[in-house]
Image (cartoon, rainbow, N blue to C red):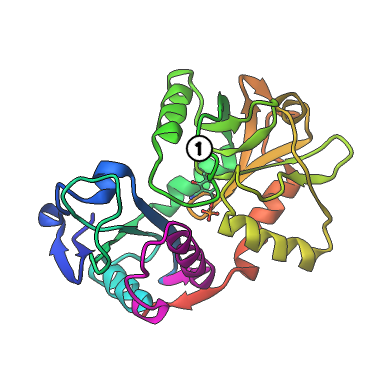
Amino acid sequence: MTRAVYVNGAYRPYADAAVHVEDRGFQFADAVYEVIEVKARALVDATRHLDRLATSLAALSIPAPMSNAAWRLVIAETVRRNRVADGLVYLQVSRGAHPRDFLFPPAGTPPTVVCLARSIPQAKRAARAARGISVQTAPDIRWHRSNIKTVMLLPASLAKEAAKAAGADDAWFVDADGHVTEGASSNAWIVDREGRLVTRALGPALLPGITRRTLLDLLAREGIALVERPFTVAEAQTAREAFTTSATSLVMPVVAIDGRSIANGEPGTLTLRLRTLFHEVAEHTPLS
Ligand code: PMP
C-alpha cells in the first residue's frame, strides 16, 4: 500500500498526490524516470540509477532538480514513510508546468519531481523466476533515442497489452532488420547454440540498463565471456537459454518466444546462476 508520495518538496497522502494539468510530462511526455530496487531495506545500485537520471535529464536539457545527496534523502524518507522492505522506488522528473506550448517554458520554471515507493511481494517474484516467462515480439515503433529513459512508454504499453492478449507474459521489441532491440521494459539476452552469452551492444536503439551494467561486473568476476551483437528472433528461439534484465525483474528466465519453447522450456542453468549471484556484485545502500 502506498501511503505517502513525495511531490515537489512535500510528502502528500497517496490520494491527494497530484501534479498540474499543464505539466509537460502529461502534455508532451517531456519527463524522465528511474526505477530502483529496494531489497531488505537497502537501495540496489542507487549510484548508477542516479547517474543515469542525471544523464537522461542532461540529454533533454531539463535542469537537475536536486543533488544526488538530496535525492538519497528524499528516497530514504519516501521508503520509510511507506514501510517498504522489499520493492521499488519510482522517481520522475518533468520539465515542469506551464501554459501549453511546444517550446520549452522559460528558464527558471521548476521541474516537477515525484518519488514513490512500493512493496513487491518477494514470493510472487521468486515464483515467476522459477517458472520463467513467455514473451511475444512486437515491431519496435519507438523513436530513435530509446537510450534516454523518458516516460514516452506508449509503444511498450501497447506491446505488453498485445502480448497479454496473446497469452504471453511480456514483450520484446524487434527492429526493422529483424533483430531484437530489447524487452519492452528490460534488456534481452541469449545463450547461443555455441554456449556464448549474447546481448545487443548499447546504442540509441536501447536503454543502457543498470541491471545489464551490473551483470557485466558479475560476468567479469566469474570469468564469463560476453558477445555484444544483435540477434534475430529465430536465433533467440533456437538458443540454449534466454533471459531479460531489469531492476524489478533482475535476471528473469525466458522460456518461450512467440509460442516456441526455448530448449526444454525450463529456465536455463546459466540464467539461474546469474540470478542467484546478482546481488553479490550490486551496490547496496542501507536505508535504515
Ligand atoms: N529497457 C527498457 C526499455 C526498460 O524500460 C528497462 C527498465 N526500466 C530496461 C531496459 C532495464 O533497465 P534497468 O536494468 O535499469 O531496470
Magenta span includes 73: no
Q: On screen, 176 above or below 72?
A: above
- Residue 59 among those drawn in magenta: yes
In the foreground, 146 or 40: 146
Apparent side of residue 216 relative to residue 160 in the rendered image (left or right):
right
Q: Disc 1 marks which residue?
A: 143
Which quadrant holds the C terminus? bottom left
Residue nearest the observer in this picture, 36 or 23: 23
Disc 1 beta carbon < 8 A from ligand 1?
no
**Residue 71 picture quarter:** bottom left
Q: Residue at x 27, y 63 (%)?
A: 111
Is 14 left or right of 224, judged from the image as shown? left
- Which quadrant does the N terminus fall into? bottom left
Residue 188: image location, x then y, percent: 64, 41
- Which residue is at a point 39% across and 56% down the rendered structure image? 33
Residue 35, image x, y percentages: 42, 57
Task: Give the percent coordinates (x, y) of residue 255.
Answer: 64, 32
Q: Secondary structure at mark 1?
A: loop
Residue farthest to the left, as pictured: 16
The stretch in magenta equals 42-70
Q: Residue at x 34, y 75 (%)?
A: 66
With 149 as the anchor, is 114 left or right in this view? left
Amino acid type, residue under disc 1 in the picture:
Trp
- In which quarter of the view is residue 110 placed? bottom left
Measured from the top left, where is residue 178 in percent x and y?
A: 69, 25
Tell me the crowding category of disc 1: few under 14, some 14 to 19, or many 20 or more residues within 10 angstroms, Cα based: few
